Amino acid sequence: MSSALVAGIAVALAVFFVILIVKSLIVICPPNRVAVISGRKRTLSDGRTVGYRILKGGRTLRIPLIERVAWMDLNTIPLEVSVTNAYSRGAIPLNVMGIANVKVSSGEGLLENAAERFLHVDHSHIGKIAKETLEANLRGVLATMSPEEVNEDRLKFSHQLIDEADDDIKTLGLELDVLKIQNVTDDVNYLESVGRRLTAEVIRDARVAEANRTAESEQAEAAARRAAQVAQIDADKTIVEEQNALRVRTAELEAISRAREEEALVAGETAKAVASQALESERIELEKRRVEADVVVPARADLEARQLQAQAEAATIIEDGKAQVEVFKRLTDQYQAAGDDGHDVLVLNMLPDLIDKIVATVQNVSIDRVAVVDTGAAGGGASNGDSNGGSGSRGGIPGLMSQLPASLVAMTEQIEAATGVDILASLRRRDSDHGAEG
């Protein structure tokens, strides 16, 4: 346990010594101070070779035993600047008192001048040197200005003094922050005499100005009274003119008012007539709409219905016609494919229609009753001889039935004469064909 404690103490001491060593190696510069590290040579920007380097703010490392650190303050140094019996222009001695604030300059190139002149120098000594320099410059500036200029335009005097002392102060490595002139006096009462003279001039000018102002005031008052009377006259004249204009304007407005009233009456009658006309137009339009609703619309609807029905019937007829055309086309194709028999088949298919047409020729003949009279004995010959040498003709129903074949033959002959088709021959050929197939 004791060995661990000893080891801990040794480590703490080692860390402490390391911190001390590092702290002695690191140079940290605050913003209001300048560190001058001397011991090694370096070349400045103007080509000079010096044995120091300057650190302005921040930190750096120094080499122990080789480099040494010195400090310079950048704080402001207040000064009281005063000269006595300093001759101004015109050989008038003056006493001038003022205040100034100077400091070690931190500008490029000026800090080296200050380090070379004021390193390890107290602020009081730096202030003394700056004060002597400023007072010398103050005497030089006073010699170029009259007492009146110095006393009246102190700002100009301060600016000239700053311009005069700036080069000398910078050469020392200092910087002039503020320079103000507080008091300017003289031992021969020159400024007081000048003041009394100026005061007398001011009083005189004031009295003259007062008299001039009084005369001007009286003149202005008279002019004002005259202007007031003229203005009163002009006002009265203006009032009369305005009253006359008002009467004229009143008459004009009354005439305009009467004309407007008449125009309003006429406009009212016109509006009434227009309204009546518009009402009548509305009635006519209403009647048109009623007639259209009662007559035109139903008629139009019926027309559209009839048109739709006609279109439907026409569509049916067209479709039936297309179907018949298609049927006729197929029948024609079949009849053409049948060759010569196709003609006969066509006529046979048309035979019922032909018979109907033939029968229709006598459809207007009205047969009320048919009486069959039997003139001969059944199965016996007639009393009259047959011209053909055969048996006697039969009468009655048998005689009628015996005439049907001849009638059919005559009808087929008529059809053959009309169409060119021998129906009996076609039937016999079909029977023979069927027999051959059997």
Image (tube, rainbow, N blue to C red):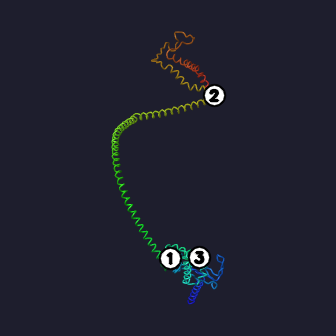
- Left/right of residue 370 with respect to residue 229 in the rendered view: right
Between marks 2 and 3 in the image, the one whose residue lies nearer the viewer: 3
Q: Which residue is mark 1?
A: 181
| Residue 114, placed above or below residue 410 | below
Whole-percent x, y for residue 389 in the image: 57, 11
Judging depth in this view, the residue of 280 and 145 nearest the camera is 145
Whole-percent x, y for residue 182 in the image: 49, 77
C-alpha distance separating marks 1 and 2:
151 Å
Total numbered circles: 3
Whole-percent x, y for residue 275 in the image: 36, 38
Label 3: how many residues lie within 10 Å, few (<14), some (14-19) or many (20+)?
few
SS of the residue under disc 3: helix
**In which quadrant is the C terminus drawn?**
top right
| Residue 287, placed above or below residue 212 | above
SS of the residue under disc 1: strand
Q: Which residue is mark 2?
A: 339
Q: Which residue is mark 3?
A: 167
Name the quadrant containing residue 65: bottom right
Name the quadrant containing residue 343: top right
Q: Identify which amino acid the numbered label 2 is placed on.
A: Gly
| Residue 421, placed above or below residue 391 | below
Seen at 56% across and 10% down, the residue is 387
